[in-house]
Image: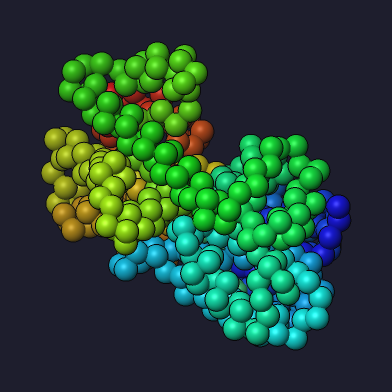
Amino acid sequence: MKTSISVIGAGYVGLVIATCLAELGNEVTLIDIDELKVNSIRNGVSPIYEEGLEDLLRKVNMQVTTDYEKTLPSKIIMLCLGTPSDESGINLNYISEASTKLAGILKRRQDYSVINIKSTIAPGTTEGLIIPSLEKSGKKAGKDFGVCMSPEFLREGKAINDFMNPARIIVGEHDRTSGDVLCQLYEHFNAPIMRTSIKTAEMIKLASNAFLATKISFINEIGNMCKQLGIDAYDVAKGMGFDDRIGNKFLNAGVGFGGSCLPKDLKMLIAKAQEINYEPKILEAVLKLNDEQVVRMLDLLKKHVQLKGAIIGLLGLAFKSGTDDVRDSRAIGIVDALLKEGAIVKAYDPLAIKNFSQIFPQIEYVTIEQVLNSDAILILAECEEFNKLDYKGRIVIDGRRVAKAREAEIYEGICW
Ligand SMILES: NC(=O)c1ccc[n+]([C@@H]2O[C@H](COP(=O)([O-])OP(=O)(O)OC[C@H]3O[C@@H](n4cnc5c(N)ncnc54)[C@H](O)[C@@H]3O)[C@@H](O)[C@H]2O)c1
């Protein structure tokens, strides 16, 4: 059913969701507090790189604004605010501020609308923080307005396809009527819809990401052992993957996971466990092992190069290929350590140089060919173009299993 929808937060998730919902014929209003971002989107220029997004953005018709008043006619309001991690665990300020602003709007609304939380949050956050904030409007959840928590599972780099073709849709509902409204929106998607409680939906998202992170740290642990034992971790993963209880996805050993989701969602779940006095042994080990992969990579490099004064070339700055997102990317820890050791860093990425240079303006950003003229090269993402380079005569430490890099004079795979 076509409906009027507001999406609050025009980031990697909100912008994709809003554009896709508009493409599906809904009447969409996209709201962000960042005026530059709003203006850019209005002009058909996507502030983030996501394959196919800009073309779709230019095609669809949607209202883009900083004005929360424009949510007034919307039947569904989706919250897509960032929930980054910080020293205290998780930063809920953005979601808190948006809920407070929405309460001001709800106060004046006469009709029924459903607030749907898409941000990733720990179990209990909707009921403990968001609903009380919205109810400061004097209106009551479940009576005057509806609330759902429907986590988003899209992957950056494949976000449009993932949103349009989800593997499942989880509808955490405050009450049946709230859930009915959301289910009507989703009924044309070709995916199973699971209706559940809000807390369960919050946990499904965190548990899913924690499981994926666990799979990666698991295969990295096996890979670290394989390297010492002279076994190819990729052959081991292939052999394991024939078993459909295990599956063959997320078994690529390497320098570990980064990005705006897996590390932060894992930390969010660990913080929740600590809050309820539960010791999350597996989750903590997953995170620790992931951090240690960076150290392993640097140790392999130091076996072959004296870092002080050496030129180290980096291939891959985004947290993975196909995105410009550098949040929690593996390259951040690596560059930090290299600079501390006195190395000179020259780096290349097909999409993420602009974002990375905001964190490290002091390193040199070069062409892909210029990276080859370094004393040693570290491969940190699995971009196709890295597999076309001529590595002969070079020293390469590979964190992502780039086949062509094996031609290097000195080649070290992190787990193989
Ligand atoms: N990035 C992903 O691949 C992904 C996938 C699934 C779920 N998620 C979750 O979705 C949520 C959003 O992630 P993201 O990557 O899109 O974050 P983001 O930081 O890219 O986007 C958040 C946007 O919200 C805007 N904003 C901040 N305060 C605001 C306010 N008060 N009102 C309106 N707009 C405001 C910011 O300007 C920004 O554009 C997070 O909880 C994340 O964990 C992300």
Q: Quadrant of residue 336?
A: bottom left
Name the quadrant of the C terminus: top left
Q: Is residue 324 visible to us here?
A: no
Q: Residue 330's spot in the image, x, y percent? A: 35, 48
Which residue: 14% across, 35% down? Answer: 303
Q: Residue 382's spot in the image, x, y percent? A: 45, 36
Q: How is the image coloured?
A: rainbow
Q: Quadrant of residue 77?
A: bottom right
| Residue nearest the viewer, comparing 173 with 395 | 173
Residue 404 sits above or below residue 264 on the image: above
| Residue nearest the viewer, comparing 47 with 9 | 9
Which residue: 66% across, 76% down? Answer: 140
Is 364 placed left or right of 36 in the picture?
left
Residue 73 sits above or below residue 381 on the image: below
Which residue: 71% across, 60% down? Answer: 178
Q: Is residue 239 visible to us here?
A: yes
Total labels: the figure holds 0
| Residue nearest the viewer, comparing 360 with 248 | 248
| Residue nearest the viewer, comparing 148 with 345 | 148
Residue 97 sits above or below residue 40 on the image: below
Which residue: 57% across, 46% down? Answer: 153
Q: Residue 170's spot in the image, x, y percent? A: 62, 47
Q: Residue 286's spot in the image, x, y percent? A: 30, 42
The quadrant of the picture showing ligand 1 is: bottom right
